[in-house]
Amino acid sequence: MGTSYSVHLVAPENTQVTDELAVSIRETLTELDHRFSTYINSSEISQFNNSSSEDWIEISPEFLNVLEEGLHIGELSNGAFDMTIGPLVDLWGFGPSESRQTVPANEDIETLIKTTGSNYLEVRNSPPSIRKTQPLLKLDLSAIAKGFAVDQIWEMLAQAGFTNYMVEIGGEIRTRGMSADNNDWMIGIENPIYETELQTNMPIKNIVPLRDSAIATSGDYRNYFLYEGIRYSHAIDPRTGWPVSNDIAAVSVIADKAIKSDALATASMVLGKEATMHLAEKKHIAIQLTLRTNNGMQIINSPAYESYLANF
């Protein structure tokens, strides 16, 4: 998936963690990569994207699970999360095509946005299948697949009998039980300004205690380009075809599963501060926003997010 991963296990006493477990984890991640990566021409998603057929195409149960959750988050966010923006991601240089340092032509954006939209994607459960009603429709699962992969490894470890562990892929994290010191897993969140430092210099202590929960963070401070003094990030607003332009520098979302926190973090980047906080309060979602202001960075938390910090 173009990133790193780590698994931290607190093994019970007299339990031997064998090399076979590490091999199984690598094999599972490789398999998922060959389902969801647009950088692999033979992957499940690439085969769908490269086809202009409007016939039903059978997919794996894993692919179906990701699509169903993505469509749910799309509805929840009123279209702020959309897995069909692949062509727009490519146009802006953030996909498998070559990167760019200039803004695309308006007419190119307008042309491609007409080929996007989850309304052009049909999904059925039995047998697991999908079809496109727009021949140029393409999927991009980069904002949800890592979270799903975290959940898959989390489930694998649960089935293996472990009760205390943390799984991380590209910064998306899900925990179970407690860490080696018999406390919650302490998750630090990076400062968007100083990417290698934790946000300990921020107004609110930004270390989150997690137990049996997942957290994901999205931001505009890593994958972007500057053109004529303006920052264009990889977070594309599917409603406009342009990179998001608001005061949000980063979003962290806590949920029961990583697939949810992953997708909701991206949706929040697109929605902006007011709409995100309204959604968070209405649906009791744990969200933290890091905002750029004239006075520097500001952190605001939803009530559900505050509850995670209450005893810390």
Image (cartoon, grey):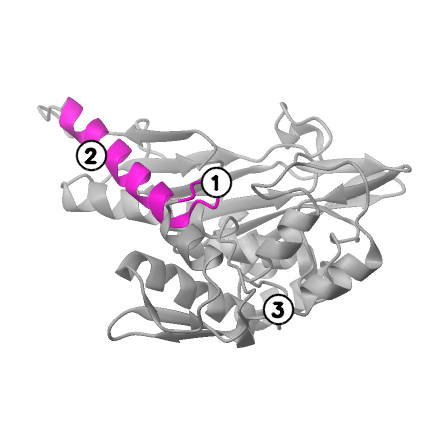
Spatial CA span between label 3 and label 1: 33 Å
Comparing 239 with 211, the one in front is 239
Residue occupying the point 71% across, 38% down:
224
From the image, tell me which residue sits under label 2: 24
Against 22, residue 118 (above or below) is below
Residue 266: x and y in percent read 59, 53
Q: Which callout, 3 or 1, points to the residue nearer the camera?
A: 1
Against 111, residue 222 (above or below) is above
Residue 267's image quarter?
Answer: bottom right
- Magenta residue span: 19-41
Secondary structure category for the residue under label 2? helix
Is residue 188 visible in the rendered image? The answer is yes
Spatial CA span between label 1 and label 2: 23 Å
From the image, tell me which residue sits under label 1: 39
Q: Amino acid at mark 3?
A: Leu
**Could you tell whether 173 is left or right of 94 in the image?**
left
From the image, tell me which residue sits under label 3: 279
Q: Which callout, 2 or 3, points to the residue nearer the camera?
A: 2
Residue occupying the point 63% across, 58% down:
268
Name which of mark 3 and mark 1 comes first in the sequence.
1
In contact (CB < 8 Å): disc 1 and disc 2: no
Instruction: Please check the rendered image and state whether residue 23 is part of the magenta-colored stretch, yes or no.
Output: yes
Comparing 304 with 4, the one in front is 4
Name which of mark 1 and mark 2 comes first in the sequence.
2
Residue 14: x and y in percent read 8, 23
Against 151, residue 190 (above or below) is above
Spatial CA span between label 2 and label 3: 38 Å
Q: Quadrant of the N terminus?
A: top left
Residue 35: x and y in percent read 35, 49
Residue 206: x and y in percent read 60, 37
Give the overall secondary structure of the magenta segment: helix
